[in-house]
Structures are given as structure tokens and as C-alpha cells.
Amino acid sequence: MADVLVVAEVAEGKLKKTTHSAVTFAQKAAAALGGTYSILVIGDGASGAAAEAQGLGAAKVLVAEDASLKSYLAERYAPTVAEVGKGYAVVVGTASAYGKDLLPRVAARLGAGYASDISDVIAEGSQLRYKRPMYAGNAFGLCSVSTPIQVVSVRQSAFAAAEPSGGQSPVEKVAVKAPSGAAERVEFVSFDQVKSARPELAEARVVVSGGRALKEKFAQVLDPLADALGAAVGASRAACDAGYAPSDLQVGQTGKIVAPQLYLAIGISGAIQHLAGMKGSKVIVAINKDADAPIFQVADYGLVADLFTTVPELVKGIQAAKS
Amino acid sequence: MKILVPLKRVADPDNANKVKIPASGEKIDTAGLEWKPNPFDEYALEAALRLTENGQQPKVRAGEVVVVTFGPKDTETTLRAALATGADRAIRVDTTDDKLDGDLVARALKALVDREKPDVVLMGKQAVDGDSNQVGQILAELLDWPMATFAATIREEQGALLVGREVDGGVATLRVRLPAVVTVDLRIVAPQSVYSLKTAQTFKYNDGVRFAALPAIMAAKKKPLAEVKLADLAADQGLKVQYHGFQPPPARKAGIKVKDVADLVSRLKNEAKVL
Ligand SMILES: Cc1cc2nc3c(=O)[nH]c(=O)nc-3n(C[C@H](O)[C@H](O)[C@H](O)COP(=O)(O)OP(=O)(O)OC[C@H]3O[C@@H](n4cnc5c(N)ncnc54)[C@H](O)[C@@H]3O)c2cc1C
């Protein structure tokens, strides 16, 4: 038994991009273990998403679909994921809100150890070692999981999205396992989606993030810059807490982890909790009026200036440079 | 309502750039770092206090908040601080961090829950040292209880909690019937995040967690603090996740300060080639 099971993430009948990162992990891990990987697509609308998953080079795509899985609830998903997981050496998902919520419950059901939010997998003989960021990204720990089945979640920004393989994996239906008592006591009430036409933070090539300094002008100042760059918008915790930006946009140790080609930090001080979420970006630009702001310690290009006058100028400059 | 709040003492993350990794890479050297309660656990405690009072001045407490930590004798400081802000009772499970992983903590907590029978286990979504984000979820599964993770809002209902969870793409609201496990996110300590059945809907708390007044700190010294052996809670003390070494993060090369916007744009275009 040396195979890997990828737990796909599905939204509105489509495979979420997070799944592709877990597949990249699975390719690495399966190669090290001398096994194959399969993808489990679970949820309402799973069959549509399964068609997409078929193109990702898996030995097979397993589909668990049932009316009881309509809205995601860990208590309803975990029993089926764990049941399918029994046949595998490693069960993997992405450390998105979904993966972070679901996978520890799956691990507990399997009596398996769980290594979360890993940024790399290293083969030592036929053993897997996982690298995981700790202490707000100030250290990496190398760990291994000693149980027969291992459960891991992977950091999306650390594993490139798997590309379509050109093949078509066979699809197999799997039975949905009846949940236990916990499921009877939880009810999905609603999902208030923050709608945005911009790219998703975790997948964007460019991210423009704003801090507390932007105040009520957060969108007014940042939107034109994001538009000029085709960027996703992010925010510091302070900006989210103050209500200048939706909390879904928080970048950092306890928010989203991003690693785009270009990250612009506008009026962000650069607390370690923020740096933990964006330090992996290829090129970092910081605009801050305080020359000693810690953000400048990680910025490739720092501009000491008032953002309210500088950002509009920058928008014009970028538009001119691009045309 | 009876609420159990697990609290972890962590090396102050704001000091984390001083976390040292010896050349051997054997362990993380936390010597000289300041200890403080994991911020998310402090938020969980604040939420627990709000759920067990009426949101008026003077406060009337209803229910019980029990705090528990896993650690050596000196972690009792963390528990006393929690008692000073309003927790009723404390339990210290005698052990050290290196003898624990998330799974063992969850198993020991399950045994404690079986004894204490709280209505809610309220805890931080992650500890900011290990950054693992798993104990609450594992505990919920071991107990076969429903859970609501990453809570930004909690509203008590008759026999249930209505919880707004911060997830990718927005806020998901769940109703969990008690007993349940809830893990909290940063915004749980905003002024209008937590309402007990007795709190007026218009009541606003101060932003953030409360501080202990001096008399409360004195009184906390007399509140009950029990010690429990880890072996009494978990017969099997084997760890499922083992650490083999630690590495510092790759250093970023020092950047430059640019003169003005024109300089910045030209460098982004010609040097970094990202425009
Ligand atoms: C448990 C915990 C978890 C956390 N998780 C996160 C996280 O995930 N992400 C996160 O971001 N933070 C997180 N934080 C918070 C973090 O510690 C900082 O408080 C936060 O990042 C600060 O946000 P800020 O830089 O926007 O605000 P501030 O610290 O207020 O900084 C504002 C900056 O703007 C500059 N400025 C002001 N006016 C102007 C102007 N006109 N022009 C240019 N510059 C200007 C100032 O010089 C300053 O540097 C966490 C904290 C804790 C305790």
C-alpha cells in the first residue's frame, strides 16, 4: 500500500484550483513511494468536477455524490473521505479553509497523524518527510508521520498547480458512508459570498495589498492600481479588523498565504504575521511613509512616500509603461 | 453554560524573529523569548466570558468557564492570568511541549471533556508557534461532536450556537447544537461578535480582550487550580508526528529604496520585468 489519495475541493460543481496543488504533491509523494495517486471528488455536483479531475493524470477518479452532501459540512464529509482513505498510504488536501476544516477530522477517524500546511515533501528512502513553516514563518520544521496512513494538507502557494496530463482517468463511483451522531447536530445555515470580479488571491500573478493607512479610502485608492495590474486585492489584519476590507482578503500567518510574481504592500507596516503570508512573493514593492517600517526589510523596491499622492501617480506610470 | 477553554503558552510571536535555530538544527531555541498566552486562546477565553455573562454593568455571571493548559509548573502563570480575567477554575496537565503533538493533546482533552462535561469547548483556531490548526477539529471528531471552526461571530440560541465562520470567499454560518467544539478566529473579539442569550442585541463590548484589574489578580490566587497527570488522561502517550530538525527560512536579499514613482516603474519594467 503506497498510493496517495487527493481530496478534491469542489465549489458550484467545479473543481477548485486548490485541488491542483494537492495533485502536484501527490505526484511527488507517489513517485517517492513507488505508487499511484487517485482523486476523490466529493460533494454535490461532484460528477461535473470529476470530468475535470479526469484530466489530471490520476490512476482513477473516485466520485462520492449524494443529496446529503449538498452543503459542505465536515461532519458529513469526513466519514466518506476516511472510508475511501483506508486504502491509501497518504491522504492529502490543500490547506484552504476547506482542507483545514475537514482533514483533521478525517485523520482522527483514521487514527492517523496529520501534518498541516506543508511546503515541501522530501523522500528519505521510502519514507516521506514533510517541511512545514512554523513560528509565523520564522522556522521550518521537518517532520514525519508514524501511522500507517498519513494525512497532510499542503500550502497552495508552495506547490504549483498540476497541469492537465492529456490522459483521461477512469471514473469510479464510491458509496457515501452514513455519518455519525455529530452530523445530526450541525446545520448549514447560509454562505455569504464576497463577490469579486478580481482574480483569487491565492492564484493571482500580481497582488496589491493595503493596510490600515488606507482608512475608508481602501477601495478608492487600491482598485485603480489593481485594475491597472490585473491584480488581486489583499489586506493586512488591521485593515480587515477596521472594516476597510472584507476579512476574506487578509494576507498573513493567520489569513491567506500568497506567493505571486509581484506583491505591492501599500501602507502596510510589515508585522511578522503579515510577512508570514507574503514573504514568498517573487518581487515585493513597498510604499510607506515611514522609512523604518519593517516591510522595507523584505521589499525588493521600497518607496518612502505618502500613499495617497503616490498611488495615483503609480497608476498613471503603470498605464503608460504598459501601453 | 459550562465552557472549557484550552490555553497554550507560546513564545511571543512578536519576538519570533529572535527564534533561534542552533547549527545542529536539532531544536528551536526559545531561550530568552517572552512567554505569553497564544492570542487565539485569549480570544477564545474572552468569547467564553462573553457567553457566560449578561453584557451589562455590573456583569452578572451565569455558567462556568474552566481553563486548561498542558505544561510544566510555570505555565500556571498563564492559568492564573486567565483566572484573573474571569475564568472560574483551572486545570494544568503536567507535561512539556516536546512530549506532545496535536493528536495527543486532543486525546487528553477528550478524556478531560468526558470528566468535566462542558457544553462547549471553545478554543483558538491555531497556536502561533506550531501553526498547526488541528486540535479542535480532532477533538470534535473524537467526541463525535459537531464543530464550527474559524468563528468570527457567535450567537447563543436555546441549546445551540449560531456561528459565523471566516472561510475562503466569505462567511459561512452554521448552527451547532450543544455540546459542540468551536474554534475562534481574530474577529471574535470585535465589539459585536459574541452574544449570549442574556446580552442585549444593542450591547457593544470593548474591542479586544479584557484586562484583569488588580483586585481580580489578587482574587485569582485563591481560585481553584488542579493538577492532572497526562498519564491519567491518555494511556497511550505515543506521538503520531515526529520532528527531526528545524531550518531557518531562506533569507531574502536586501532590496533598495527607489527615488520616486518613475524610478519604481522603470525598474519594475526593465529590471524585474514584471510589468
Ligand atoms: C494572533 C495574531 C495573528 C495575526 N495575523 C495577521 C495576519 O494574518 N495578517 C496581518 O496582516 N496581520 C496579522 N496580525 C496583525 C499584525 O501583527 C499587525 O498588527 C498588522 O499586520 C498591522 O497592519 P497594518 O500594517 O495595516 O497597520 P499598522 O501597523 O497600523 O501600519 C500602518 C502603516 O502604514 C503607514 N502609513 C500610514 N499612513 C501612511 C500614508 N499616508 N502613506 C504611506 N504609509 C502610511 C505607517 O507608517 C505604518 O507602517 C496578527 C496579529 C496577531 C496577534
Image (cartoon, coloured by chain):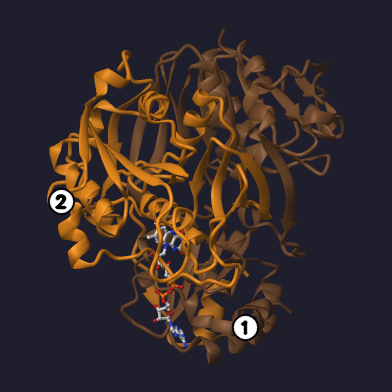
Question: Is residue A145 found left or right of B160 in the rendered image?
Answer: left
Q: Badge 2 sits on which subunit?
A: B
What's the colour of chain A in the image? brown
Find residue A24 and report its horizontal and vertical position in percent. Answer: 61, 33
Quarter of the picture containing the C terminus of chain A is bottom right
The residue lying toward the viewer, choosing from B106 and A198, is B106
Disc 2, SS: loop
Q: Is mark 2 within 8 Å of ligand 1?
A: no
Question: Is residue A212 found left or right of B8 in the rendered image?
Answer: right
Chain given the colour orange? B
| x 25%, y 58%: residue | B15
Q: Amino acid at mark 1?
A: Val
Is mark 2 in CB contact (under 8 Å) with mark 1?
Answer: no
**Residue that carries the numbered disc 2 in the rendered image:** B221
Query: Is any atom of residue A132 visible in this view?
Result: yes
Find residue A141 and report its horizontal and vertical position in percent. Answer: 34, 36
| x 40%, y 56%: residue | B61
The residue lying toward the viewer, choosing from B101 and A209, is B101
Image quarter for ligand 1? bottom left
Q: Would you call the spot at circle 2 few (<14 residues within 10 Å), some (14-19), or many (20 or more)?
A: few
**Residue that carries the numbered disc 1 in the rendered image:** A221
Tag in front: 2 or 1: 2
Q: Badge 1 sits on which subunit?
A: A
Q: Would you call the spot at circle 1 few (<14 residues within 10 Å), some (14-19), or many (20 or more)?
A: many
The residue lying toward the viewer, choosing from A272 and B213, is B213
The residue lying toward the viewer, choosing from B221 and B184, is B221
